[in-house]
Amino acid sequence: MQAHNGMYIDGDWRPAAGGGTIEVVNPADEEVIGAVPAGSAEDVDAAVRAARAALPAWAATPPAERAARIGALRDALAARREAIAATVTAELGAPISFSQAVHAGLPVTVAGTYAALAAEHPFEERLGNSLVLHEPVGVVGAITPWNYPLHQIVAKAAPALAAGCTMVLKPAEDTPLVAQLFAEAVHEAGLPPGVFNLVTGLGPVAGQALAGHEGVDMVSFTGSTAVGRRIGALAGGAVKRVALELGGKSANVILPGADLARAVKAGVANVMANSGQTCSAWTRMLVHTDRYDEAVELAAAATARYVPGDPADPATRLGPVVSARQRERVTGYIRTGIEEGATLVAGGPDAPEGRERGWYVRPTVFADVTPEMTIAREEIFGPVLSILRYQDTEDALRIADDSVYGLAGAVWAGDEAEAVAFARRLRTGQVDINGGRFNPLAPFGGYKQSGVGRELGPHGLTEYLQTKSLQF
Ligand code: NAD
């Protein structure tokens, strides 16, 4: 399973300066499947120095040449598809079919979009008597979570490299093995030493050292709002650029004229995918009071098809959650939902039958959820759906926006124009209309406490650029 024993710094694999390691555990059977170096501030410093040294040459490399290297990276990732899928299934617990399609497939697509964008992007523009240069921000410190471990790396690395930045990545401690596969692909793609560096380690140690390093010009973070807030404060204090992709509690608004069966089925699938560990998951389903009971029945029936099982089995649709800590957190929220008076219509806090080993959670649906309940307000990050009732469209809008988050959402209506009119009024970064497909070029990111900045596509690229104006 394990690709490498070291951290990838300045084009080479090396152990942590302090010699420490972090074990990686398979959430399906609790077996240790590998270990990675526990990087310290010293390792972060070595990586940042390598990135700084590599910056002038990479920033000066013609965009077409950077695009060619990103294209080669895309190919190297595509060649590792099977290993990537197997690794993500082993360290995250995602069902292998989902790992193949999404965890391994999406990063190839995203890297491909940046191979094209790096070549096409207008890095210079004329404005009156000025020539405006769009230059790389500099050295990027990227800190990523475990839930879409490779996608979140590529969503930062590909645009940063396309922009001409160099970088140091600190991936999540639960899923570091796929980050090693990414570094291996970078090496094979022929990126010059120091352009991309990988430091594995704990968040409060290696992550904090990276976010606070004076040689880092921009911090790009994806993870919890609690840690994001701290990183934002640290970056603000040092007057550094910061991008934050944080949590969500997105609303799936089913307007009265919608195809209810389709909307509920898609809504349940959206929440159960990746065991509910998706920041943009539509965890609040909003249904008109006249169709509420029918929707609850449909949701319970749809949920019954998600039987927790071995993620290595191609037939499995729902694996475990990533860690014992995450299972505690999710089952704690399920208990809170029951205590606060929501009606449990599927699942519950106990381990699924026959799945006492491994960190499995029953796919859970709550009805009679009111907007003030904890399960309607806080991000659970597990396979738990809350169904709320609304009286009319204004009520639906008020409930949908009654959140500190604003990352994603969905609107379903009989008439597309009606859904679009509603979506225009929502305070959230993305809205899927009547089951609109994920678009890897569309800007992704949050309103309110869901974050600062956007990832993916051309908007994701401009995050890593700064401007200089020359007047004539
Ligand atoms: P987390 O915030 O605990 O960890 C994320 C990363 O930050 C990890 O690499 C971790 O090691 C590091 N980290 C932890 N403490 C740190 C510190 N003090 N200084 C620097 N780095 C530190 O989050 P998580 O539990 O790994 O991920 C789950 C969360 O991420 C959820 O809340 C989810 O919504 C959010 N998320 C958001 C998006 C998005 O795009 N908006 C995507 C995925 C996940």
Image: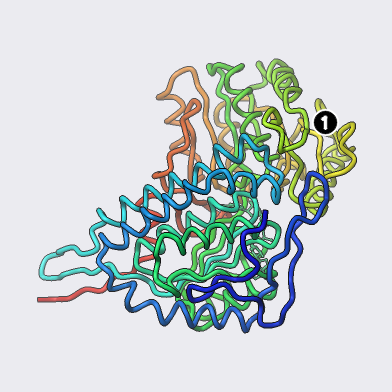
- Classed neighbour count for the residue bearing mark 1: other residues with Cα under 10 Å, few (<14), some (14–19), many (≥20): many
Label 1 SS: loop
Q: Is residue 414 visible?
A: yes
In the image shown, does 407 or 402 lie closer to the viewer?
407
Image point (20%, 64%), residue name: 124
In the image shown, does 222 or 62 lie closer to the viewer?
62
Image quadrant where residue 130 sits: bottom left
Q: Is residue 230 visible?
A: no
Image quarter of the C terminus:
bottom left
Seen in the image, is 155 located left or right of residue 177?
left
Examine the rendered structure and indicate whether residue 134 appears above or below residue 72. below
Tell me which image quadrant ligand 1 sits in. bottom right
In the image shown, does 237 or 369 lie closer to the viewer?
237
Residue type marked 1: Gly
Seen in the image, is 425 located left or right of residue 309?
left
Residue 164 position, x and y percent, is 35, 68
Residue 222 position, x and y percent, is 57, 59
Residue 394 position, x and y percent, is 55, 31
How many marks on residues? 1
Examine the rendered structure and indicate whether residue 137 appears above or below residue 434. below
Examine the rendered structure and indicate whether residue 329 appears above or below residue 340. below
Residue 106 position, x and y percent, is 49, 43
Seen in the image, is 66 located left or right of residue 331?
left
Image point (43%, 74%), residue name: 193
Q: Which residue is identified by label 1?
A: 347
